[in-house]
Image (spheres, rainbow, N blue to C red):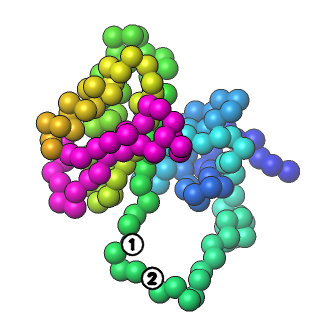
Amino acid sequence: MKKQIKKGNTVVSMDDHIKGIVQIVTDKTVTIFDEDGFERVYPINRIIVYDDTLDQAKVIPKVKDKSVKKQRNTPKEFPVIDLHNTSRYLAKNEILPNQIRIFKMELNSAIGKSFERIIFIHGSGNGVLRKEIDRILKRHNIQFGDAPYHTYGQGAIEIYLPKKHKRIV
């Protein structure tokens, strides 16, 4: 019997094996904070409630290929942050400042964790959030471009983080 997903559950994504705590549950999606503190949104049918009484290796099989040697400098997974779902219960004049605050916090976290890139989903509205993100990135001399359309659709930005970059304010 499958456990019902609710706020506060520890869950694991079936796609990328990310574990986190459920923050928001809708009919179709689940928003979690992963172990690195990033907010992630998944389809509800791709999430499993984590049961620590089971051997997690059975729930999430990890296949080791012994023919491939582990590389020393393998790139870390990159986070995908959805900014346009972060402001549901705010007044109109609070939405953009909240999105910018979350953008800066998540970008600083990715820089601190030495990620090579990060993707932000900003949505495809009238472009106010995207213009503000562009302005911040240009001011800090950080490279960026549109995220792959076939994966994220219109309304996402991919940011390339240099190895030794200072955090933004």
Q: Is residue 56 left or right of residue 126?
A: right
Q: Are marks 1 and 2 in contact (CB under 8 Å)?
A: yes
In the current view of this chain or complex, which residue is farthest to the top?
Answer: 92
Q: Residue at x 34, y 15 (%)?
A: 94
Q: Residue at x 15, y 44 (%)?
A: 141
Which portion, as a residue range, is magenta? 142-168
Kind of residue sitting beneath label 2: Lys
Visible in this render: residue 124? yes
Visible in this render: residue 109? no
155 or 120, nearer to the observer: 155
161 or 166, nearer to the observer: 161
Please identify the quarter of the rendering in which residue 100 is found.
top left
- The residue carrying mark 2 is 70
Quarter of the rendering occupied by the C terminus:
top left
Q: How many residues crowd mark 2 within 10 Å: few (<14), some (14–19), many (20+)? A: few
Please, what secondary structure does the residue beneath circle 1 have? Answer: loop
- The residue carrying mark 1 is 74
Q: Is residue 48 left or right of residue 32?
A: right
Q: Residue at x 51, y 36 (%)?
A: 153
